[in-house]
Amino acid sequence: EQVHTADGQGESLYSGTVPLQVTQKGSAYELRDATRGGSHTTDMGGATDGFACSAFGWGCKSGTIVTSPSTTFGDGTNADPDTAAADAQYGTAVTWDYFKGEHGRDGIFGDGSGSYNRVHYGRDYVNAFWDGQKMTYGDGDGVNYGPLVSLDVAGHEMTHGITQNTANLTYSGESGGLNEATSDIFGTMVEFHAANSEDPGDYLVGEEFDLRNGRGFRRMDNPIADGKSPNCWSSNTKNLDVHYSSGVGNHFFYLLAEGSGAKTFGGVAHSSATCDGSTLTGIGREAAADIWFRALNVYMTSGTTYAQARTATIDAATDLYGAGSTQVGAVAAAWSAVSVS
Ligand code: ASN
Ligand code: ZN
């Protein structure tokens, strides 16, 4: 059967009016992007997976493909359930384009095939996740948090898929912290990649749907601001929840890209201090991200520790910029600045 792809658009919650590739189905349109491996978005209508899904891998629900009578999806408000779907689908498109354009990665699986998003998962669910096959997004509780379909979180969840299909960092201990940091790093890069006036790009994670103070769950310039994520490595880092032990990797990446001291992103003051008192100059986001991606794709393995991540990123920077380059020196200095030697 021939696929009829059409230029559509989303009226999103967090990114304004966004372009979407949609698929004609009869006299209607599906939120399915034939130009990006058939990536699509389904609506769970408040349903969740049962116990048997996580325990045995059956009883998982796939939701209903989001459909519109026109090429426009959503109305920019939560009154229309297709609005959050438009954000999720847009997040997939931007993440797809970021990884393909910047890192030559052809989708999560590296073979050009797509995955899918499930939105409106559960009731008052304040989380999002990758389960090995697809991304799932909750609506938040509507009081402190809105739907978790912002670009940084979409990029974060899709990056879990890419990590699983590259280094496959085990999701516990230090490798788990590196897995989480990888998702925060590329989720942030995706946000910058799509930077628009409504969401200009910053090193906060989840600020768009934070209805309390707009600061989100985590921040990379000063991870300890959440009270739990360490700025500096210690022998206890491996014992922390992976969403906190990521702080060391997030802080490293910020220092490598932006350097120490104060900067402003998206109108939000950022400030990063080193653990060893050094002063660092950043090498820029693109170089830092290229180094991290090559380390993830070529050098890191399932059991990589922070000390091994230092070696992996130095090796990646050496490949990309040459031994003795400014970038290699900056990678070493930024790891030392988060107490990883
Ligand atoms: N939102 C979380 C994450 O992607 C869900 C989890 O704990 N895996 O990290
Ligand atoms: Zn994660």
Image (tube, helix red, strand yellow):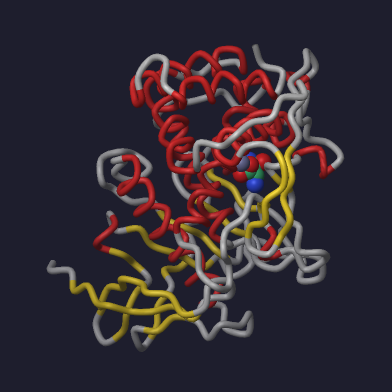
Please tell me which residue is depicted at 58% across the width and 62% down the height of the picture.
Answer: 150
Residue 307 seen in the figure:
yes
**Which of the 4 image quadrants contains residue 332?**
top right
Q: Is residue 181 left or right of residue 43?
A: right
Q: Is residue 121 above or below residue 322?
A: below
In the image shown, does 106 or 129 lie closer to the viewer? 106
**Which of the 4 image quadrants contains residue 51?**
top right
**Which of the 4 image quadrants contains residue 249?**
top right
Q: Is residue 151 above or below residue 296?
A: below
In the image shown, does 267 or 67 lie closer to the viewer? 267
Residue 51 seen in the figure:
no
Return the x and y of residue 176 as percentages of the image width and height: 62, 26
Return the x and y of residue 171 as percentages of the image width and height: 61, 27
Please identify the quadrant where the C terminus is shown.
Answer: top right
Return the x and y of residue 287 as percentages of the image width and height: 43, 37
Please tell me which residue is depicted at 57% across the width and 33% down the height of the picture.
Answer: 256
Residue most extreme to the left: 2
Residue most extreme to the right: 227
Q: Is residue 38 left or right of residue 136?
A: left
Ligand 1 is found in the corner quadrant, namely top right
Return the x and y of residue 307 as percentages of the image width and height: 61, 13
Please identify the quadrant where the N terminus is shown.
Answer: bottom left
